[in-house]
Image: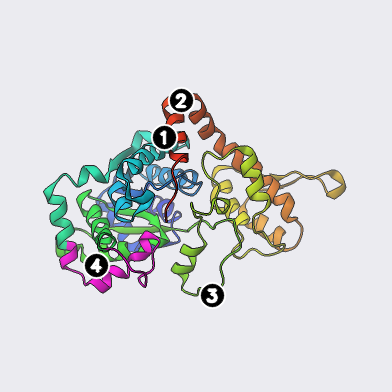
Amino acid sequence: MDTEKKAQLIASIGEEVLTREDLLQLLQDKPHPVAYNGFEPSGRIHIAQSVLVAINMNKLIDAGCHVKMFVADWHAQANNKLGGDLEKIQTTGKYFIEVWKACGMKLDHVEFIWASDLVKDPNYWQLVLKVAMMNSVDRIKRCSQIMGRSDEEGLSAAQILYPCMQAADIFYMGIDICQLGMDQRKVNVLAREIAPKLGHRKPIVVSHHMLLGLLEPPKGISDPVERATAMKMSKSIPDSAIFATDSAEDVERKIKKAYCPAGEAKENPILEYCKHIIFERYDALTISRPEKFGGDLTFAGYQELEEAFVAGKVHPMDLKNAVARYVNELLQPIRDHFENDADAKRLKETVESYSVTR
């Protein structure tokens, strides 16, 4: 694959790429760059953190990248996830890895890294300190979106430290491409700004779209990043998300009651599942209907489906039934893994017993 095609494939992941020119130059200089994505282990893992992440990581791998999946256990503790209980957080991290193993990620090119290993090195903390010294408290507080927080909240001192750690992670792990959600944009931009001062190349930021939660979008939020953050799936609101280990019945129930206004494509989570997940994994989407309602419909691409839906040619319930069928097919290998692997099954049961904290 030539450089331009690699750049196109990587850019297809992102709602925004900072910057396309830098990405092309990186790929010319370094045919096998290092990319990363990371998560706080903070409860059950949903479809955007599992199937969608596998789709995105596989694109990076196909473009020649070495992928580092970062298990941000210390960050989750700093953000008071699972009550700040590090043992619970690390158990959840092991569960995350089991899900990633089962959801179609090309593991031969993936390295799993834990924050708890990074923090053993004094050189890591030197980087954290340097990042902190280069930025004001106000600037760091403006990065609080990365934790699902507002800079107007009463942040703990640990939460002030968090963005400094996340920027340091990038430099310590030698990351060339930060492939995270749009909600992580501010700290990635901060890393780009300070990289030259620390003697590092500016990391490329490929920010993927935040998959909508299944509930009706909130009103009164105009800032695009804040709105995307507010509309994403929430582990503390289970019906807003499809979880990787949900039963087929749970998937059908959640999708059946999901927000999907007839004829409206904007902020429609069911159409988003089609665009960002189903058409990424399938060549076509078929909607099954009785002959008296026109018979089956097959769409070869997302745009064709959206146009038919907006024109009223596809009923929301017919679309929901199709989406539930495809999602269940995608999740079945994950369910099978947790049913057939005794250790994975114990991890799942343990994590499901935890109370999720915001």
Label 4 secondary element:
helix
Label 2 secondary element:
loop
Is there a contact, CB below 8 Å, between mark 1 and mark 2? yes
Please give the residue where the numbered disc 1 appears in the rendered image.
Answer: 98
Tell me what residue is drawn at x 38 percent, y 42 percent: 61
Residue stretch rendered in magenta on the structure: 131-156
Residues at marks 1 and 2, CA–CA distance in whole angstroms: 10 Å
Please give the residue where the numbered disc 3 appears in the rendered image.
Answer: 220
Give the amino acid type for the residue marked by disc 1 in the picture: Glu
Residues at marks 2 and 3, CA–CA distance in whole angstroms: 46 Å
Quarter of image, res 193: bottom left
Around disc 2, counting alpha carbons within 10 Å, would you say few (fewer than 14), some (14 to 19), or many (20 or more)?
few
Q: Relative to the observer, which residue lies in front, 64 or 263? A: 263
From where the camera sits, is residue 22 visible? yes
Earlier in the chain: of badge 1 and badge 3, it is 1
Q: Is residue 353 left or right of residue 3?
A: right
Q: Relative to the observer, which residue lies in front, 66 or 40? A: 40
Please give the residue where the numbered disc 4 appears in the rendered image.
Answer: 193
Please give the residue where the numbered disc 2 appears in the rendered image.
Answer: 341
Earlier in the chain: of badge 2 and badge 4, it is 4
Earlier in the chain: of badge 1 and badge 4, it is 1
Tell me what residue is drawn at x 38 percent, y 35 percent: 107
Around disc 3, counting alpha carbons within 10 Å, would you say few (fewer than 14), some (14 to 19), or many (20 or more)?
few
Residues at marks 3 and 4, CA–CA distance in whole angstroms: 31 Å
Q: Can residue 141 be found in the magenta stretch?
A: yes
Quarter of image, res 162: bottom left
Tell me what residue is drawn at x 49 percent, y 68 percent: 227
Q: Is residue 96 left or right of residue 335?
A: left
**Which residue, as the protein is rendered here, is positioned at the far right?**
292
